[in-house]
Image (cartoon, grey):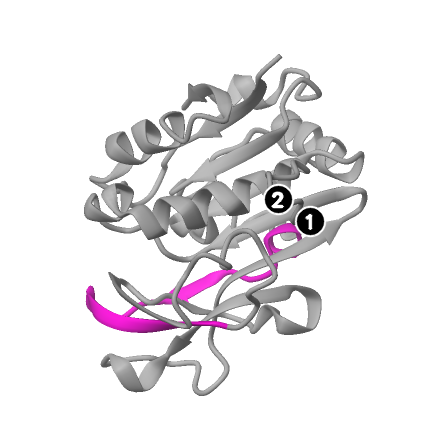
């Protein structure tokens, strides 16, 4: 049986024009049956049948109190969670969500080309990438550095673009464990073009696979 993902794209703040292409791209990863919703009631229902829940450029407060409780129990009991791009701009009023994700969005400079540096090549989200990856995005800064509570996979080279605010240690993608669950986050994914980029799609696939607890054909954990 094909594993299932719940892809959630509700926004109550900024809404990305890239969302339709992003949802299509996740569907076309091919490894999962995707249930896509913007209805918060979907997070109030049992989540046990999903390999992972994906917050795909959600923004603002997007969950009900019951949904928050259901997501907490799901992850703590071993469920997977993946956050993409504006997922870090989500649920500012819920302290647990900041802990779950590892860091919260603070600001970003203008959309521009820059360089992402692979820090951990042993992870399926990054091992296919070149050591220095040229990409165009918003290069999110975060309110805190997640390094002390996460396994950092990808960092930003702030010398390669204008307006970076975190300095020499600027995580962009990471993973962590929460209770018995697995959490993956990538700050990349602002543009429609990203969801047509083979390297970025492989980055997403590897991160979602890891969060879902799936081994790929090379046996990466």
Drawn side of residue 167 relative to residue 151, left or right: left
Q: Position of residue 191 (x, y in %)?
A: 22, 49
Residue receiving disc 1: 221
Instruction: Reply yes or no: does residue 106 show up in magenta.
Output: yes
Q: How many residues crowd mark 2 within 10 Å: few (<14), some (14–19), many (20+)? A: many
Earlier-in-chain disc, 1 versus 2: 2
Determine contact: label 1, label 2, CB under 8 Å.
Answer: yes
Mark 1 crowdedness (10 Å alpha carbons): few <14, some 14-19, many ≥20: few
**Residue 170: % across, % down:** 47, 76
113 magenta-colored: yes
Seen at 60% across and 55% down, the residue is: 98
Please indicate, yes or no, whether residue 90 appears anywhere in the rendered image.
no
Tell me the residue at 65%/50% (across/down). 100
- Residue topped by disc 2: 210
Q: Confirm whether residue 107 shows in the render.
A: yes
What's drawn in magenta, residue-wise? 98-118
């Amino acid at each position: 049986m094909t594993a299932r993902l719940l892809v959630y794209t509700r926004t109550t703040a900024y809404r990305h024009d890239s969302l339709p292409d992003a949802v299509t791209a996740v569907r076309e990863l091919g490894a999962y049956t995707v249930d896509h919703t913007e209805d918060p009631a979907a997070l109030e229902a049992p989540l046990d049948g999903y390999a992972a829940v994906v917050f795909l450029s959600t923004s603002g407060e997007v969950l009900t109190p019951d949904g928050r409780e259901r997501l907490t129990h799901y992850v703590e009991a071993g469920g997977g969670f993946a956050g993409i791009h504006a997922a870090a701009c989500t649920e500012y009023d819920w302290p647990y969500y900041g802990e779950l994700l590892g860091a919260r969005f603070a600001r970003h400079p203008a959309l521009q080309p820059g360089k992402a540096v692979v820090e951990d090549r042993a992870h399926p989200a990054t091992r296919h990438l070149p050591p220095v990856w040229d990409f165009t995005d918003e290069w999110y800064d975060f309110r805190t550095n997640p390094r002390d509570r996460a396994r950092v996979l990808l960092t930003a080279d702030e010398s390669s673009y204008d307006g970076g605010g975190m300095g020499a240690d600027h995580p962009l993608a990471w993973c962590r464990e929460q209770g018995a669950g697995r959490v993956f986050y990538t700050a990349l994914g602002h543009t429609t073009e990203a969801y047509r980029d083979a390297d970025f799609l492989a980055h997403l696939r590897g991160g979602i696979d890891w969060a879902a607890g799936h081994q790929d054909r090379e046996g990466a954990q």
